[in-house]
Image: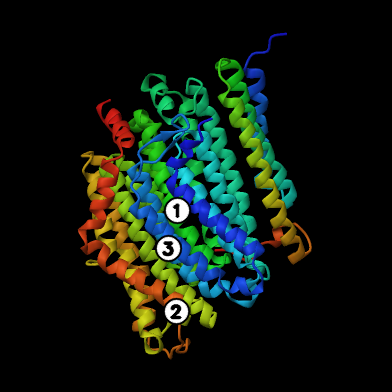
Amino acid sequence: MDLSMLWYLVPSVIMLACGIYGFVTRKNLIAILISLELMLNSADLNFVVFNRYLFPGSMEGMAFSLFAIAIAAAETAIAIAIIINIYRAIGNTDITEIKKLKF
Amino acid sequence: MDYSQFGSMIPELIVLGIFMVVFLFDTFSGEKGKKILTPMATILFLLGTIAIWIVPASGEEIFGGMYVNNTATNAIKAILNVGVFIVLLQSAKWVQSDEVAIRKGEFYELLLVTLFGMYLMVSARHFLLFIIGLESASLPLAAMVAFNKRHYESHEAAIKYIMTAVFSSAILLTGLSFVYAFSGGSLYFSDIAVNINRGEMSGLLLAALAFVIAGIGFKLSLVPFHLWTADVYEGAPTAVTSYLSVVSKGAAAFAFFIIFVQCFGSVYSDAWEWMMYAVIILTITVGNLFAIRQKNMKRFMAFSSISQAGYIMLGAIAADGLGLASMMFYIFVYVVSNLGAFAVISTIEDNTGKLSMDDYNGLHKTNPKLSFLMTLAMFSLAGIPPFAGFFSKILIFTSVTGTGSWALYMLVLIALINTIISLYYYLLVVKAMWISPDEPKIGNFESGRCQRVSLVLCGAGIIFFGLVPYIYQYCYDAVMNSSDIIASIMVFVFR
């Protein structure tokens, strides 16, 4: 079966939208982190799909998405470390309780 | 592979060398060695800074054009180095305090790694290298923001910073993936510039540019993307706040100019001129209006730095060699004026723990020298002659009006009106220190040796940078001698 580019781009956009929606509405830091991962993965998917369909002769998009995945892993590691610090300080990871700094 | 190419990356090699020395020394030296870590790191960094000022740029493109080291990138690296050196001096007392002393090596290592990332960001001519630089500049910064382990505020600031930083880089990556669709299969800035043209203006290109502006705008804290700034600046340790507000912002502003002029120069008037126009007006105005009601000095400086970022971006909307030169000069002046203000804030915080503006009432009775320097810094940030801030503002306004478009004249007019608003809140601090009749809340104290050096450096910079023409001439020559930037500007003017 021959799939056109649209079959990959629409799920990617849905992933991005779900990620943004989750980032804005979820109250748990871990859930927010998962939403961020969704957004990063949708960008990687875009790169791979554009490379495969538009520029099959080169590998630039594939290489870029490999680096982007590695960077996303580093970001998650640091975010998790900070979430653990928060957990030690206030006993949970609920963002409604992280509200001392405002205005 | 030809390893001799690495020899062209002189500034990066210097910072990496300092990093390795500090790292190995911190790991293997005993308790006695830890005592000389701070002076060693500071002196090594001073030598590195001098070396970057002296060693001429090779002007070579290496790794197939991914990385370029020309006079303009060399100059901005030297400017960033001056900022980092002043931050090192300011933080000397804080890193010796009981809470931090045991981990001070980590502070220097993270600082140097972020600086290395900013170097890559400034020198990159390929989006892969740019993203790697951007992330290695922003991820260690999150760890630095969380450095005060025992303070809850530090953790809250760090989680806000890392979440918005990752969100913004996800947005930026999405934007770049759209740009990649137009680029003809290459992510080199020069190839993208060839493949993007007016004929193919479409919604996708506009979305891509908006995403890229949003992604880099987060780092610069331009206005619709500024909400993290005040919280992070308030919660972070003061040394990290001053680093965030000048050095990281300066590098991002320069990289922004390079990306938008070199890659997207040909769609300037169609796509991103009006986007940046709106963003700059919002940034300057909202930053100013929110600064008026702040009572905490670090939050106050956060909103002041948001509005200053708007002025810096005026150089990007001018988008020519003069714009870049005056932008670099503005960043240099901003480094000394903002760090001057932060030097006073951190000196007072280290010695008395006071941070509120009300605590500054009557400061001149007990600490006249600190009050004097704070006044100089505030005058310079507001742009009162004859201090450096006046000349940097005049040069950046001239570069914008020099383009000759009436819309940009209006932009300069709005920026000028905002300068007057900013005068009000900068003078609130001066009023608290000199005119307020209250009894001083901060007693007389002796500041540390390193802090005194940083205060004198900033004061001298504020007074002399405007009056000594060599500094602006240095920025101007650096831009005019870097052929690839000038060539891309030329192409885009003639279109």
Against B475, residue B440 (above or below) is below
Question: Of helix, strand and loop, which one carries label 3?
Answer: helix
Question: Of helix, strand and loop, which one carries label 1?
Answer: helix
Residue B30 lies, in percent from the top left, at 66, 70
Question: Of helix, strand and loop, which one carries label 2?
Answer: helix
Is residue A17 among what the camera can see?
Answer: no
Residue B308 lies, in percent from the top left, at 38, 57
Q: Residue placed at 51% from the left, 67% from the top?
A: B40
Q: Mark 3 Cα within 10 Å, few/some/many (few <14, many 20+)?
A: some
Is residue A77 among what the camera can see?
Answer: yes
Give the Cα distance between marks 1 and 3: 21 Å
Residue B390 lies, in percent from the top left, at 25, 61
Amino acid bearing label 2: Arg
Read off the residue under disc 1: B249
Read off the residue under disc 3: B46
Q: Nearer the viewer, residue B55 or A79?
A: B55
> Image quadrant for the C terminus of chain B?
top left
The mark nearer the N terminus, 1 or 3, is: 3
Tell me, for residue B397, which label it has, or none. Answer: none
Residue most toward the top? A1
Amino acid bearing label 1: Lys
Read off the residue under disc 2: B449
Against A8, residue B482 (above or below) is below
Parent chain of label 2:
B
| Residues tagged 1 and 3 counted as in contact (Cβ below 8 A) | no
Parent chain of label 3:
B
